[in-house]
Amino acid sequence: MTSLPSTEAPPAAHPWLRLLRLHHWLKNLLLAVPYLTAQAWAREGALASLGLGFVAFSLVASASYVLNDLADVAHDREHAAKRHRPLAAGEIGTTAALLVAALAGLAGVAIATLVGRAFLAALLGYVVLTTLYTRRLKRVALLDVLALAGLWTLRLVAGAAAIGVELSVWLLSFGASVFLSLSLVKRCAEAQAAAGEPGRRLPGRGYERRDLPGLQAFGIASGVVSVLVLAMFVDSSAAQLRYPHPGRLWLACPALWYWLGRVWLETLRGAMHHDPVVFSLRDRASWAALGAIGLAWAAALAPW
């Protein structure tokens, strides 16, 4: 079993590293996806803009994680795994956490101004949405997962803005479907880990345990839609214009299906970590599937 059980032991990492969730900075590598799909490596200054954008987004995201944890302290203490978070466990005080969040957020916004107005607008959109999520949307069934998927998708928008390219509708549709599926994985894992009667509301959420079958159906369907979008893109005029061998992108479809299928199978078995990204980072099969997707993309770009 590659995922952590719901009663996992307290992490060994330093409390401040866990509070800022530095390992979640890997999520912000999504900013580079428009750079890769637009094949913008010849664009002058694109890499430098991406680097600054990555730092800015990561600092602001860390600030949002701190504020989210501050708002969720009481509910986290009722969760088998989240009770080990630094604020819920009392390892870090509220005042210190607020100060660090403010500094990280301001530094991120300051760096974003160096990247450009469009990137700054996308980053501020992320701040607005994450604030709405923390204060209200996380407690509204279905709107919460739409908000989570939106936060992921805004990383693609910000990445395109950072290098000055138009975000493909194909990439936007594909990313939104994948992110919605992963957001529903997160909610299903939380619902499975919650104790109590089927009709009891999950702490701080808009769901009950008996909502699980519906959430699972929505999540699996969203994953299938993402595979369908990718398959349709392979035969599109956009792919024909951009890739020397677009047909090779078909190889990414079974790899994507396998990865999402594995994530959902572990979720249905009740073995999913409450964060599917953490699960995937620790799962060799997920790395292999994602690597296969990358190889299919590289093969489509090959000149021979």
Image (cartoon, helix red, strand yellow):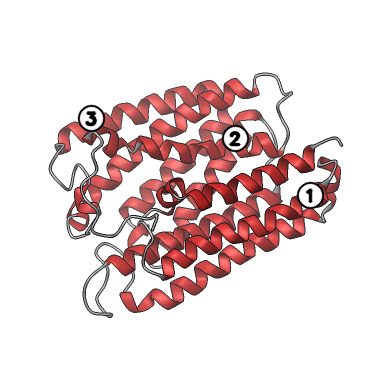
**What separation in Å lies between label 1 and label 3 (alpha carbons)?**
50 Å
| SS at mark 3 in the image | helix
Residue 23, picture quadrant: top left
In-front residue for pair 49/244: 244
Amino acid type shown at disc 2: Ala
Q: Is residue 57 above or below residue 6?
A: above
**What separation in Å lies between label 1 and label 2 (alpha carbons)?**
22 Å
| SS at mark 1 in the image | helix
The first of marks 2 and 3 along the sequence is 2
Amino acid type shown at disc 3: Leu
Residue 60, picture quadrant: top left
In-front residue for pair 83/48: 83
Q: Which mark is residue 99?
A: 3
Q: Which mark is residue 297?
A: none
| Residue 280 at x, y percent in the picture | 46, 50
In-front residue for pair 287/74: 287
The first of marks 1 and 2 along the sequence is 2
Kindly check if marks 2 and 3 are in contact, taking CB atoms under 8 A apart as contact: no
Residue at x-position 82% and y-position 52%: 247
| SS at mark 2 in the image | helix
The first of marks 1 and 3 along the sequence is 3
| Residue 196 at x, y percent in the picture | 21, 75
Q: Which mark is residue 32?
A: 2
Q: Which mark is residue 248?
A: 1
